[in-house]
Image (cartoon, rainbow, N blue to C red):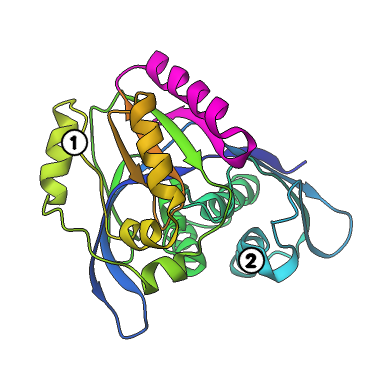
Amino acid sequence: MIGKIKSYPKINLYLRITGKRKNGYHDIETLFVPLDNPYDEITISESGSKGISVSANSPTVPDGEKNICWRAAAKFAEKAEISPGWKIDIFKNIPVAAGLGGGSSNAAAVLKTLNKKYSKLSERELAEIALSLGADVPFFLNPTPSLGKGTGEVLTPVEIHANFALILVNPLFPITAAWGYNNYIPCSRKTTLDEFIETLKEGKIPEYIVNDLSNAVFKKFPIMEILKDSMLNAGATCVGMSGSGPTLFGICEFRSTAESAAEKLKKKFGNSIYCTTSSILS
């Protein structure tokens, strides 16, 4: 076996769109935060034959060149001048197309695992491959609370004192980032990223979450408002949407509050949602 690694998700505690480029990509300012749960497991083995193969425990995960892990491995092999003979197994727990960065995290996990094995590429070269795969992928090479600017790839680590617990609720339908960015409705809240981070540095829970992508999702899918209200009623202090959604996260002051809220939500919505507790990865 070449290596096995846990692949963690992220949430965007803050996301503001600041412009649009000629190539169609949007400039943003965001606060990425890695979470300790749920996580995927990526295992890479020598296959005994030429090429790269990918398998997963979920039918929603594509194989071959459509899979971001396949592309990550192929680009690594090309840059490192290695003839690949690898099998990549993905055990998914992170919901797909959920705003949690699961695919980007998986791709970064592949890059890190291969480079640990072969020690062929510098950190800069690895970051260049990561960015070519997606704007979120560089963050997952070293997942720590970070400011993200540009398309999300210009990263600055930031210290925050956010020891709160989280509830994650996903309504079990996917939303692509492309749809989210093409249909976004700017958030009316005027809180700046600096003001938001200052609140976290003081150890306080924000009164609300800023995410320019959330309004369009809430407008198109009424269930989102129902879930948000239910999370607040179950004990969350505030609720926001991560990335382009549709995953909602609820911030709770205590772990016990988050666990109690999650049980209430599971009892109310049953198998119509994915619900779990989480905390910031340290």
Disc 2 residue crowd, few under 14, some 14–19, many 20+, Cα 10 Å: some
Q: Which mark is residue 128?
A: none
Q: Secondary structure at mark 2?
A: helix
Amino acid type of the residue tagged 2 in the rendering: Arg
Amino acid type of the residue tagged 1 in the rendering: Glu
Circle 1 residue: 207
What's the magenta bit mostly, secondary-structure-wise? helix
Q: Is residue 197 left or right of residue 244?
A: left
Task: Choose top left, top right, bottom left or bottom right for residue 70.
Answer: bottom right
* Residue located at (70% from left, 64% from top): 82
Q: In the displayed image of the protein, which residue is found farthest to the bottom?
A: 22
Q: Which mark is residue 71?
A: 2
Residue segment shown in magenta: 253-282
Is 152 located above or below residue 182 in the figure? above
Q: Is residue 232 in the magenta section?
A: no
Q: Is residue 26 visible?
A: yes
Q: Is residue 2 left or right of residue 135?
A: right
